[in-house]
Image (cartoon, grey):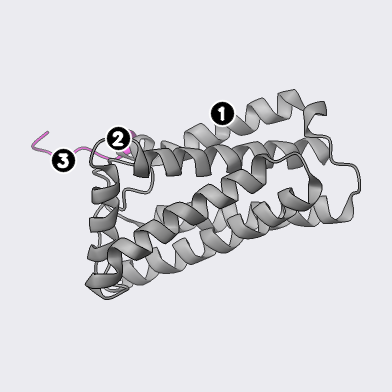
């Protein structure tokens, strides 16, 4: 179980890193994300930019906590990851219920409309974070450096989940016109 827990740590850290970079590094990425937040119509338009900043700051904080090699900070990072992923799931679910299907720009530029697969991904990740939190809370030894193979697998899985929109588009049925 210890190796699985460290793999989940790495996967979540990669996902939050990719999300943070995708929203802040490419030219215009933060503006696209801010627009996506506003288009979800969950907060008044004047608060959209502030909410977008808060999301990015929270993702960076979770990432910093996850990669700090202390059990206490890892536990805080996992709790924060579960909470954020729960909020993201609720926000996307609410937007979908209200008919909003614009791309969310969760990991930067995307043309894939928000869908139930985003909610399922986030809920699954939140459950994994909670299971991982329970493991770390019940075990005194915290030595992620002992599990390089599990960490590598976690990073690969994190990369695949960060590319979920691209994978989804790849396997989506083509229209007759295409």
Check if mark 2's residue and mark 3's residue have beta carbons within 8 Å: no
Q: Is residue 44 left or right of residue 61?
A: left
Which residue carries the number 1 mark? 156
Q: Nearer the viewer, residue 129 or 57?
A: 57
Q: Tell me residue 53's x, y (percent).
A: 38, 57
Badge 2 marks a residue whose secondary structure is: loop
The quarter in which the C terminus is drawn is top left
Note whether 65 is above or below 151 in the view shown.
below
- The local secondary structure at tag 1 comes to helix
Q: Residue furthest left?
A: 177
**Quick check: 106 left or right of 60?**
left
**Residue under label 2:** 26
Image coords of residue 139 (percent x, y) = 89, 49
Residue at 31 percent across and 48 percent down: it is 105
Residue 140 on image: x %, y %: 91, 48
Asked whether the residues under the numbered discs 1 and 2 touch, taking CB atoms below 8 Å apart as contact, a structural biologist would say: no
Q: Please give the residue where the numbered disc 3 appears in the rendered image.
A: 175
């Amino acid at each position: 179980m210890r190796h699985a827990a460290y793999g989940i740590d790495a996967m979540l850290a990669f996902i939050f890193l990719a999300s943070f970079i995708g929203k802040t590094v490419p030219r215009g990425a933060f503006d696209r994300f801010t627009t996506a937040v506003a288009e979800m119509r969950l907060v008044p338009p004047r608060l959209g930019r502030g909410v977008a900043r808060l999301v990015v700051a929270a993702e960076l904080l979770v990432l910093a906590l996850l990669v700090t090699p202390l059990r206490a900070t890892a536990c805080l990072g996992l709790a924060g990851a579960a909470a954020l992923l729960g909020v993201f799931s609720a926000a996307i679910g609410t937007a979908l219920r209200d008919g909003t299907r614009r791309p969310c720009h969760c990991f930067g530029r995307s043309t894939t409309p928000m869908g139930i697969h985003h909610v399922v991904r986030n809920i699954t990740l939140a459950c994994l974070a909670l299971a991982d939190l329970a493991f770390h809370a019940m075990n005194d030894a915290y030595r992620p450096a002992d599990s390089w193979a599990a960490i590598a697998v976690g990073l690969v899985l994190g990369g695949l989940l960060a590319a979920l929109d691209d994978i989804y588009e790849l396997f989506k049925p083509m229209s007759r016109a295409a």
